[in-house]
Image (cartoon, rainbow, N blue to C red):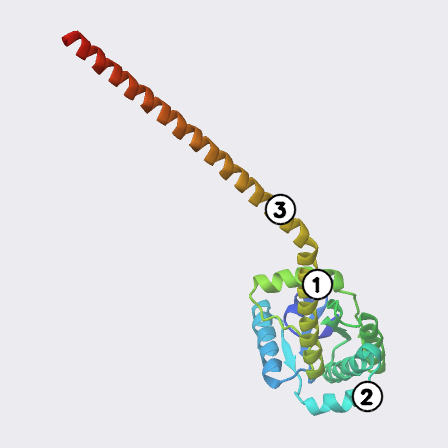
Amino acid sequence: MKTFLHACCGPCSLEPVRLLKEQGHELTIGYMNSNIHPEEEYLHRLNTLLDWARNEGIPVVAGNYNPADWTAAVGPADAWGEGHIDRCRACYRMRLEAAARYAVEHGYEALSTTLAVSPYQFTEVIHEELEAVATQHGLAVVFEDFRPYYPEATRRSRALGMYRQNFCGCAPSKAEAAAEREEFKRLRAEERARREAELAPQRAAEAAERERRKAEKAAYEAKQHAKKMMREAARRARKDAEAAEAEAAASRHVG
């Protein structure tokens, strides 16, 4: 089946491409991601994808980059639902729409997406939007929950030295990811402080025990040293007495 695979980045493409090719799909990758901010990030991800796909012999089509379209599609922040699911739904729809239009115009039979490999995405929403968009454009739906393969995609992308971004793509997700990392750091610091506080009495007791043993050892060594000095003094006294007695005896013998 001639399938147009919407891809969000290179690392997320590895396992979906492998699996879909094994299933017999004739793939072209579509990079339609006006959500990515800033443009330098967009180009970095695109170039990473192009370098890998070139080595794999897989064609890549890059859509028009127009962040204004994304802003218009997702609407104002105060309209987003809990967990930003509404924002993400609109984002998925906009990107999959762009991919579907290209697929129809260029004779593809099916539409799929690599978005379903990430455990950080709304997988069910992705499935719903892919179904809706593909059906609307008369394309077969090729959906698979690729999340079980995410660890392998991570391993392979690292082994290949691919650029791995640390946020989804849009400016809000970048800020959210940064805030989550800071929160994670704060929680780790608090956990370390809690553990230190819990261990402090034990460590203080251990330190006191070490000092007690050290003092006990020092006292023992001082006592042994004193005994040694006393034995040395007694030995010298005996020698001196013996020498004096020998000298006196010698004097008596001469007289």
Camera-near label (2 vs 3) is: 3
- First in sequence, mark 2 or 3: give its number: 2
Camera-near label (2 vs 1) is: 2
- First in sequence, mark 3 or 1: give its number: 1
Circle 3 sits on which residue? 206
Q: What's the CA distance linking mark 2 and mark 1? A: 32 Å
Q: Position of residue 99 (x, y in %)?
A: 73, 81
Q: Quadrant of the N terminus?
A: bottom right
Q: Which mark is residue 78?
A: 2
Q: Residue 157's image quarter?
A: bottom right
Q: Which mark is residue 150?
A: 1
Residue 163 in view, yes or no: yes
Q: Is residue 113 left or right of residue 234?
A: right
Q: Position of residue 36 (x, y in %)?
A: 67, 82
Foreground pick, 180 / 208: 208
Mark 2 closeness class: few <14, some 14–19, many ≥20 residues within 10 Å: few
Q: Residue furthest front?
A: 255
